[in-house]
């Protein structure tokens, strides 16, 4: 059970160019970004990319 699964990923899709296109895959976790102090729901792939390359901090939900 993943509490983020019903929320689509809020990260930009690789298909985004001039216009923002949301990734839209099922969310896997929440990622906090210090630079805008905002939390984004992201899928597994976007979480990995943001934590590894963009300084995001993964917020891991507690399992019930
Ligand atoms: Zn994504």
Image: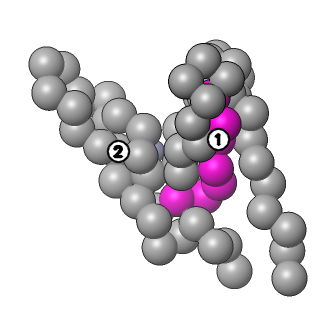
| Residue 32, magenta (yes or no) | yes
Residue 20 vertical placement versus 64 (above, below) = above
Residue 35 vertical placement versus 63 (above, below) = above
Question: Mark 2, mark 1: which one is toward the viewer?
Answer: 1
Give the magenta-colored segment's residue range: 27-33
Horizontal arrangement in the rendering, residue 56 relative to residue 15 (left or right): right
Q: Position of residue 63 (x, y in %)?
A: 85, 74
Does the numbered disc 2 mark a residue whose Cβ is under 8 Å from ligand 1? yes
Horizontal arrangement in the rendering, residue 62 relative to residue 45 (left or right): right
Dividing the image into four quarters, tell me where ligand 1 lies.
Answer: top left
Query: Helix or strand or loop: what does disc 2 sit on?
Result: loop
Q: Main secondary structure of the magenta part?
A: strand
Q: Position of residue 32 (x, y in %)?
A: 66, 36
Q: Quadrant of residue 15?
A: top left
Q: Which residue is mark 2?
A: 23
Q: Quadrant of residue 54?
A: top right
Q: Is residue 10 visible?
A: yes
Q: State which tag comes first along the sequence, 2 or 1.
A: 2
Q: Which residue is mark 1?
A: 31
């Amino acid at each position: 059970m993943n509490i983020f699964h019903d929320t689509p990923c809020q990260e930009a899709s690789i298909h985004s160019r001039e216009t923002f296109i949301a990734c839209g895959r099922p969310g896997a976790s929440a990622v906090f970004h210090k630079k805008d102090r905002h939390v984004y729901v992201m899928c597994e792939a976007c979480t990995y990319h943001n934590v590894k390359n963009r300084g995001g901090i993964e917020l891991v939900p507690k399992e019930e």
